[in-house]
Image: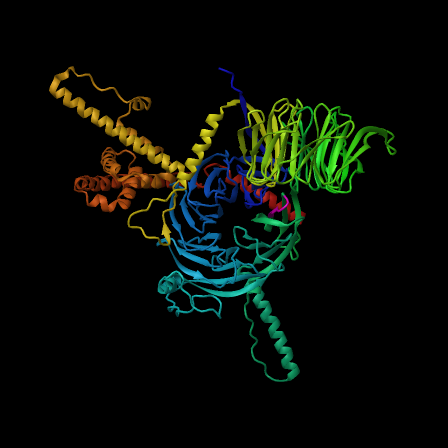
Amino acid sequence: MGLTKQYLRYAASAVFGVIGSQKANIAYVTLRGGERGRYVAVAACEHVFIWDARKGEKVLILHGQKHEVTFLCPSPDGVHIAVGYEDGAVRIFSLLNGESNVSFNGHKTSVSVMQYDTLGARLVTGSKDTDVIVWDIINECGLYRLRGHKDVITQALFLKDKNLLVTSSKDSFVKWWDLDTQHCFKTMVGHRSEVWGMVLLNQENRLLTGSADSELRAWDINYLQEEKAEGEPKVKKGKTLLDDDDDEDNEEGVDESLEERILSCRKAGSILREARDRVVSLAADAKARVIACHGNDAVLELFTVLSDEEVQKKMTKKMKKAKKKAAKSQEDAREEAAEPVVERTLKDEILRLTNIKASSKIRWVDCLSCAGGELKVALLLQNNTIETYSLRTSDKTPTANKTARLTLGGHRTDVRTLSFSSDNLAVLSASGDTVKVWNRSTLQVIRTMACEYALCSLFVPGDRQIILGTKSGKLQIFELASGSLLETVDAHNGALWSLCLAPDQRGIVTGSADKTVKFWEFELIKDEGTGQKRLTVKHTRTLKLEEDILCVKFSPDHRLLAVSLLDCTVKVFYTDTLKFFLSLYGHKLPVLCLDISHDNTLIATGSADRNVKIWGLDFGDCHRSMFAHDDSVMFLQFVPKTHLFFTAGKDKKIKQWDADKFEHIQTLEGHHREVWCLTISPSGDHIVSSSHDKSLRLWERTREPIILDEEREMEREAEFEESMAKGDVPVVPGETEGEAAPASKKTVETVKAAERIMEALELYKEENRKMEVYKYACQTAGNEVPPPKPNPILVAFGNVSPSRYVLDVVKKVRSSELEVSLLVLPFPYIPELLTLFNSYIKQGLEVELVCRCLFFLLKIHFGQISSNQMLLSVIDELRTNTVSKVREIRDVMGFNSAALQFLQREIESKEDVMFFADATGQLAEKKKKRRKRERAILTIA
């Protein structure tokens, strides 16, 4: 038997180069009681980065799995942050240790908005699948799903004192939901286009919405139940729609008398923005005193909301002015004038504060009000930058001061070229405006230098200089020690697509869109300014061709030069004479990348036709053509000293191939956009790749071998699990398709959990059958019959009883997945489960969990259970046992609660301090620090 070829697995090591992804918002967070407004959370592909804005450092990484982050929402207590993902999952991380213990799965597509309620006990999520789901954070389960919108949910807000929810969507509607009855009682249709954002103002008595035009519309909210409670007359039934010229429209089919009982809305006016395009994001600080709004440009508009006292003062001044004016006109006309009337308008309540001009287009904004009337604003820009500003809202003409700008850790535009140094320690990345050199082990930037739009790059032998080929056809030479540009050489008249170091390390070759290949030699010349010698390149030879050149490559023995052309062919020339040797044709679209193996025997070419072809360099014969990617193959490189090579494609994947066996070895998945290029270290242990998602990813070769059959089997299993999770959702008997629905969805985890419960029940039945057989045998044959051997699974769990094992399996199911797992269970397992539940409740085992499962099963299988005569006695027994046990638990909890309150009162009366409010003993210290800070601010002012 011949030896099998061993492949080693490459695994993801780190993500760097991304400061903040555009898909998710930016949010202020607090870390371990630190200063407010110092830390910001942003998405970084599938992770969440917490940045210290003052130091410009990354202080915490919340690690995701594989899906991109789409929304962030910190909890009101500042201890947790909810993170929404592209696959519809929501995970809640602790900001103290960066771990996630709670996760929810309910949406089919990416989460578009999230919001906590005031206590932080509930979380509402909206998605691109048009559903709104309310989650219970404490019980870690979904409460209900609200359906009604027809497009992406753009905002969802809880009302503080009332159990109401308001949501907006791209379908142009704003809907009000009564969470007690879980239905939509009011639909506001006063917008002509998508509603992109909204905020609640004036103690939730006003709603401000941003749409696709330059207006911010304001709506007055009257809570009619309160008015009636105060003895006010019943409000006359009017139009449901909010614009005066619109007709009444009750889309949801809701009884309008119910709508009238809860609240009424009336358009109060609108505020004109300076920008003419749509609202991209609309945010307010926690007290809703400052509103921040921006469009698709670089200008952030800030508005301030005046309090009732401030508005009253303003109106008094207006009235005085009006009276003076009236008195003056009376004197001039010498006749009695009527009492002046001053109307209170929206402009008197919401004033323009100032505009902030950012350095680039704004993508997301977050505001934070601090002590002393200071407002902090964090901006996530579209060019991978975070900017923070500070201003004092109490000033007459507030001006924003830029307090931080995070740019060092990433490029402003996509990285189009990468290169490793000869010692494997430094990585070069170049984009449209900068070139950066990174330390591979620490992933810190060593040098940042301004450059032109770079398309190709390499380290000069010795790793002291780097050379870039640019889109304008220039060669730029930089010195790393000083970080300075040594020389810019006008090399070509078109884009310089490719450059390659000669194997003798004495020069380079460049290929350009001007249809020429040029050969250059390194040379040291004396610098006129400093008098010291510096590196330059001298042009020696030119090879003219008929088509644009896309890629050039020397063979490692310096004998041949391969050139890919725009006519879909690869021409091979002799290096010394530049005579034509071979033409490799067969690709249907241009060859974008190629590489030659270390032993000069193979050449691999990757094309825009999505295929990779492997050719022999002896005769130019095509050994194999392989369908490599689902989109263009952008980059290809052999692993040094092997016949293995990597390809990168626009399909977001990096793949490893064997050029001898023509086999696909592994796929590296991680990037969320097109992969532009990659580079392999000279040792072959590391790969760095760059993508349109602005991230650079480091992959490391592990010692774990890859067995190809197992790899294919794992891929098939993953596909099967994914298809299984996407199957039909189980139908709950008796439930019609309405506005409210169960929150959770069927996933691989819920199916596996249901299978584990079924296996546990089968084991329980089997053990019961064994015991019955043993008892019968004992009765007939006496005590000589040996007892049955216990099941090894039960032994592994510490010799637990079969019934206890079933309870342990149910306990291990995640709280958020419990209902769907029980929904998947076939009915034949239910009678056995109900009997077990009865025994658990009798013994007082996990009564709350058992009751939750019991009530859910009774709800979904009510018809079959009630018609089954065998189960009537079990149900009757369950009824009495459940009521008595739940009462016991309620009494214990009530007693304990009363005892704790009594102890609190006793301690507070003895020590004369608020015991629970000041449990950590840090409140007084915080107050002192705040006073000191305020004094310092006052002295500066």
Is the stretch drawn in magenta largely helix, strand or loop? Answer: strand
Q: Position of residue 598 (x, y in %)?
A: 66, 23
At a point 21% along the width and 24% down the height, the residue shown is: 770
Report whether residue 159 is seen: yes
At a point 25% along the width and 29% down the height, the residue shown is: 764
Q: Quadrant of residue 416?
A: top right
Residue 490 is left or right of residue 686, and the answer is right
Coloured how?
Answer: rainbow
Q: How many marks?
A: 0
Q: Quadrant of residue 562?
A: top right
Report whether residue 447 is seen: no
> As rendered, which of 567 and 367 lies closer to the eye?
567
Q: Position of residue 195 (x, y in %)?
A: 51, 57
> As rendered, which of 420 and 345 lies closer to the eye?
420
Q: Position of residue 667 (x, y in %)?
A: 53, 32
Q: Residue furthest left?
A: 780
Is 759 part of what is drawn in magenta? no
> Considering only vertical position in the picture, is 571 above or below 683?
below
Q: Which residues are magenta?
A: 377-383
Q: Quadrant of residue 302?
A: bottom right
> As rendered, which of 683 and 743 lies closer to the eye?
683
Q: Position of residue 571 (x, y in %)?
A: 70, 33
> Considering only vertical position in the picture, is 16 above or below 317?
above
